Image: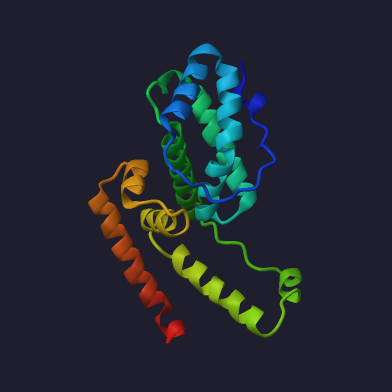
Amino acid sequence: MKATGILSPPTATITASKGYFCTMPENARLQNLLQEDERQFMETLFKTYFPLVCKAIYRLVQDMATAEDLAQEVFIKIWNRRDQLNEVYFKAYLHRAAVNMALDHIDKNKRRGGAPKEIGPDQEALSVSGPAVHLKETKARIQSAIDQLPDKCRAVFIMSRYEEMSYKEIAQALRISVKTVENQMTTALKKLRVSLKEYLE
């Protein structure tokens, strides 16, 4: 059976996900499907969690097409490892896989000398003056500062501030200690304050 045959992205808006971990009934239902009907399990898992996985990756790579491609790869890997998923909490497992996939992609892109996409002339022509420009510049400055954070540091910051995950949830998702999460957040905030100091004065 080929995994790719069932990996068609569901038409769902990628929004913030509340409730990071699976509830026991939800997780038990997926585990039952895994034992009884692997194809149905994969279809259900994909339709339920593709938006979450895609969103987690997009936060790090900042490109939707890339995020969707990497999200597909996450589910293909899950399919290939389906015999190792007993007693897994799927939501946490998928989020961790998404973050790792994004960080691997960023690392490979850096080694190839890849650079962020620049704003093209057409996009610049659509710019407006006044408060909208200031807001756009502010967002760009903040995003640039976040992009310059070390990979793991950036991941922790995004998971905390954008995805509203607790330090405990982040620690479990990344398989690091809560203390390490705290240290990474402290580092991120210090670096961001330095990067944005002149702009915020």
Which residue shows up at 47% across the image and 58% down it?
A: 162
> Residue 69 appears at what percent x and percent y?
61, 41
> Residue 10 appears at what percent x and percent y?
67, 37
Q: Nearer the viewer, residue 171 or 126?
A: 171
Report the colour scheme: rainbow
Instruction: Specify the quadrant that holds the N terminus.
Output: top right
Q: Is residue 50 above or below residue 131?
A: above
Q: Quadrant of residue 87?
A: top left
Which residue shows up at 52% across the image and 24% down it?
A: 79
Q: Quadrant of residue 23?
A: top left
Q: Nearer the viewer, residue 41 or 70?
A: 41
Which residue shows up at 54% across the image and 32% down it?
A: 75
> Residue 102 appears at what percent x and percent y?
49, 47
Q: Classify residue 198 as left or right of residue 138.
A: left
What is the residue that sits farthest to the left in this orientation?
Answer: 179
Q: Is residue 33 above or below residue 157?
A: above
Q: Nearer the viewer, residue 164 or 112?
A: 164
Q: Classify residue 165 as left or right of residue 109.
A: left
> Residue 117 appears at what percent x and percent y?
61, 62
Count of number-bearing discs: 0
Q: Nearer the viewer, residue 103 or 93?
A: 93
Instruction: Specify the quadrant that holds the C terminus.
Output: bottom left
Q: Classify residue 31 as left or right of residue 47.
A: left
Q: Is residue 170 above or below residue 10?
A: below
What is the residue that sits farthest to the front in this orientation?
Answer: 25
Which residue shows up at 44% across the image and 18% down it?
A: 83
